[in-house]
Amino acid sequence: MSNADIFVGEVIGTAILILFGAGVCAAVTLRHSKARASGWIVIAFGWGFGVLAGAYTAAPLSGGHLNPAVTLGIAVDTGEWGKVWVYLLGQMAGAMLGALLAYLVYLAQFQANVRSEGASEGPHEGAAEEPTPTLGIFSTIPEIRNPVANLITEIIATIALVLPVLAFGLTEGLGESGITVLIVSLLVVGIGLSLGGPTGYAINPARDLGPRIAHTFLPIPNKGTSDWGYAWIPVVGPLVGGALAGLLYNAAF
């Protein structure tokens, strides 16, 4: 694979991943969305389908990593570092692009995310509505802010992603069957359902950092803080987890 193919593949694939992922979070979070308040299971499956669509699209060009933690785990295992920087650049560019696309899809809902000054129907007639927080649409926010606990969660959850991804390569016939990406997508759904409660399961530095940058600069009404004080955890945790998964895989398999 050429550097150009890798870059283009990772940009496109990661953009699709974030479009689906940030899109489902917007669908569940924003007022005036038909999926409003449909819950965590919907979010977990939305992200899983994002992996499915993005990785299958990128696979012919780049192998469909879409995640610096996966790229790092593979490099630690194989010792091949020459193209890591290309993957990382593509993933970050794609993540910011995907966040922008999700914003455009829900542009009317974001623009309506303002304090209502008019009367509303029901028991709260005439009351003002608080703007819906928007950072959680783009990036992760811990339920309990404890840097040590949050970092441990992200490390363990990322190992639970990257180690099986590496091991799937040893499963005879799996790659030839073409269902590896489908299985990885279901793995991401499982991680979201089982391990996503404490931090929102970034498990992917580009998935969190790229949309957080987009959130900082997009003209979203009442968007609030981008929470840069927390931003290092969903970057460092997955990178540590990816490296540990690569070391463990190399030692055990």
Image: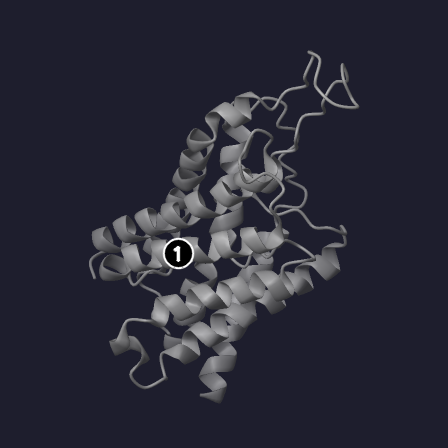
> Which type of secondary structure does the marked residue at label 1 adopt?
loop
Q: Nearer the viewer, residue 50 or 68?
A: 50
The answer to whether residue 89 is seen in the rendering is no
Task: Name, please, the residue furthest toward the right.
Answer: 123
Residue depicted at x 48% and y 53%: 47
Task: Name, please, the residue furthest toward the top.
Answer: 118
Is residue 233 found left or right of 93 in the rendered image? Answer: right
Residue depicted at x 44% and y 88%: 253
Count of picture labels: 1
Location of residue 110 in the rendering, given as x and y in whole percent from the top left corner? 54, 26
Q: Nearer the viewer, residue 38 or 84?
A: 38
Location of residue 251 in the rendering, given as x and y in whole percent from the top left corner? 49, 86
Q: How many residues crowd mark 1 within 10 Å: few (<14), some (14–19), many (20+)?
A: many
Residue depicted at x 55% and y 52%: 42
Location of residue 120 in the rendering, given as x and y in whole percent from the top left corner? 70, 18
Is residue 4 found left or right of 160 in the rendered image? Answer: left
| Image coloring type | one colour
Q: Is residue 207 above or below residue 121?
A: below
Amino acid of disc 1: Leu
Q: Nearer the viewer, residue 198 or 78?
A: 198
Residue assigned mark 1 = 66
Task: Name, please, the residue furthest toward the front.
Answer: 122
Among the 4 quarters of the image, the one containing residue 118 = top right
Q: Is residue 108 above or below residue 19?
A: above
Is residue 92 found left or right of 228 in the rendered image? Answer: left
The answer to whether residue 46 is seen in the rendering is yes
Residue depicted at x 21% and y 62%: 1
Location of residue 109 in the rendering, given as x and y in whole percent from the top left corner? 53, 27
Is residue 223 found left or right of 125 in the rendered image? Answer: left
